[in-house]
Amino acid sequence: MEIELKVKRFDPEDAKNTPYFKDYKFDIEESATVLDSLIKIREEIDGTLTFRCSCRSAICGSCAMVINGQAGLACNTKLLDLTSKSSNEVLIEPLNNLPIIKDLVADFKPFWNKIDATNPWLQPNGTPPKQEYMASNEAMLNLANVMACIMCGACVSDCTVLNVDSNFLGPAALAKSYRFIADPRDDADKSRLSEMNESGGVWDCTRCMQCVEVCPKGVDPMGKIMETREKIMEAGMRNTFGAKHATAVSNHIEHSGRIDEFRLPLQSKGIFNFKEIIKLMLPGLRFALKKRAPSPFHFKNPNQTFVKKLFKKVEK
């Protein structure tokens, strides 16, 4: 079949230092993957094209890139699934939220720095066993999917929070942190949860589900972030903005069946936290001028008694 690849190119040695798109039109087998097409370009059409690849079996994660606007592995993405009768064009770009070294090769140093920040190794206490640290099958089954992460960076690339806040640890690092928090052989839960409870940790996730959507191994990073939040609350670490926000939302739903958007920011930041309140005043004023500010008057849902019964049932 005939295919047209629009590949984003970047040469750091070019004086202009500006990324640009280059078109490649050629024939290729219908069974071909995106990686097959890139290899064909490099070997037969343009030897200057730069990209990473290794296993070609969705194991190493090195060929992660943005394909038609969404991160994925080039080796297991078929061209036939990307084209239609009206268009045979496929857009290929390097991963987002990471510096670009050349063409489709991203610099993973920021990625690994965030992974390292979670202390990704077991930290047991007490006398070491004579042979090895043991864990039950049930415990390891709970960790099976998060341990399947191949560090491809797809989730980081499509993370909407990292797109605007580089301080956020990101879905890969937070999922890696959960892997050790949930491991019964690890005894550093208190320090790990405390670190994840701070700015840049689990409370900064907006639950957009992009990391879940693009993960090639079904790790479900967002699910692990939500479970870490639960563990933080269960451990009584409720003094951070994120924990206060979660508590306020729960209280609002239980009380009236809906979020009180006027009081939520005040309760999340703290009514007497003047520094944070002042930060909220400017965007609040902009909302008010555009008549988008939430009403100070709050009303209960008609069937709120039923909602309260649900809360009590869950608490029991």
Image (cartoon, helix red, strand yellow):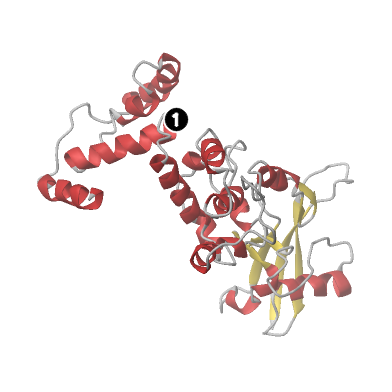
Residue sitting nearer the eye, 246 or 8: 246
10 Å crowding of disc 1: few (<14), some (14-19), many (20+)? some
The three-letter amino acid code for the residue at tag 1 is Thr
Rendered location of residue 6, percent (x, y) = 71, 63
Q: Where does the N terminus fall, quadrant-wise?
A: bottom right
In the picture, residue 285 is in which quadrant?
Answer: top left
Residue at 87%, 67% in the rendered image? 46
Residue 103 vs 115, above or below: the answer is below
Identify which residue, 238 or 262, lies in the foreground.
238
The mark tally for this picture is: 1
Q: Compared to 40, does 232 lie above or below?
A: above
Direction from residue 107 to residue 162 in the image, left or right: left
In this rendering, position of residue 17 left or right of residue 292: right
Please give the residue where the numbered disc 1 appears in the rendered image.
Answer: 240
The structure residue drawn at horizontal position 69% and vertical position 44%, both measured from the top left corner, is 116
Q: Residue at x 74, y 62 (%)?
A: 62
Q: Position of residue 37 (x, y in %)?
A: 75, 74
- The picture places residue 129, in percent across and down from the top left corner, at 66, 56
Does the image show residue 181?
A: yes
Q: Is residue 297 left or right of residue 217?
A: left
Q: Secondary structure at mark 1?
A: loop
**Residue appearing at x 69%, y 62% in the figure:** 131
Q: Position of residue 211 (x, y in %)?
A: 54, 56
